[in-house]
Image: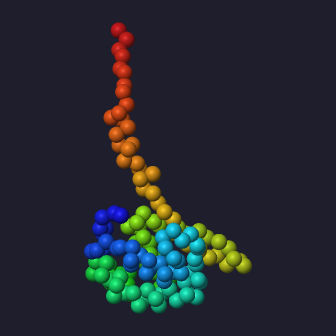
């Protein structure tokens, strides 16, 4: 888990992550089901997150509470989810799909192993290599 970031005064824990994921109809971070804004409307995600505002505000910095936890809609709900799961190296990815001539966005969770993208072992690769420098005279 990463350090505090610019949005949070307290690092989100798995308890709040799981509660938040339930509002999206997801079981846990490894749930690979996709969801749409329409699905979120059907399961009342925004209403459920509105009920969680007191708990969520324990994590957000006060100035961020004013931005993210007021006038909630599906877009802000997805932003909140993105911010909370980022601390566990997960992200919400989106793709556009056409259904009956209407474009809709489909969202799902994805693990982002930052260590694979930027492995710490690579920092020492150049130190471990042996070089031979020869000068032709």
- The figure's colour scheme reads rainbow
31 on left or right of 19: right
17 relative to 126, above or below: below
68 on left or right of 78: left
Q: 80 and 54: which one is in front?
A: 54
Q: Examine the image and state in which quarter residue 85 appears.
A: bottom left
Residue at the spot x=28%, y=74% of the render?
10
Residue at the spot x=40%, y=66% of the render?
88
Q: Position of residue 134 (x, y in %)?
A: 36, 16
Residue at the spot x=37%, y=87% of the render?
53
Inspect this view and state whether residue 37 appears: yes
Q: 118 and 28: which one is in front?
A: 28
128 relative to 4, above or below: above
Q: Position of residue 118 (x, y in %)?
A: 41, 50
103 on left or right of 85: right
85 relative to 72, above or below: above
Q: Position of residue 128 (x, y in %)?
A: 35, 33
Inspect this view and state whether residue 76 appears: no
Q: In the rendered view of the protein, which quadrant contains the C terminus?
A: top left
Q: Position of residue 12 (x, y in %)?
A: 35, 73
Residue at the spot x=33%, y=35% of the render?
127
Q: 101 and 95: which one is in front?
A: 95
């Amino acid at each position: 888990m990463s350090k505090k970031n610019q949005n949070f005064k307290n690092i989100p824990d798995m308890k709040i992550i799981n509660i938040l994921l339930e509002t999206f109809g997801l079981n846990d971070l490894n749930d690979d089901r996709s969801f749409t804004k329409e699905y979120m409307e059907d399961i009342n995600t925004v209403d459920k997150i509105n009920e969680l505002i007191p708990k969520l505000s324990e994590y957000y910095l006060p100035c961020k509470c004013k931005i993210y936890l007021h006038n909630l809609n599906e877009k802000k709900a997805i932003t909140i989810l993105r911010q909370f799961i980022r601390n566990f190296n997960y992200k919400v990815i989106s793709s556009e799909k056409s259904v009956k001539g209407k474009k809709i966005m489909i969202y799902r969770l994805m693990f982002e192993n930052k260590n694979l993208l930027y492995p710490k072992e690579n920092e020492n690769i150049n130190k471990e290599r042996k070089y031979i420098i020869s000068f032709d005279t």
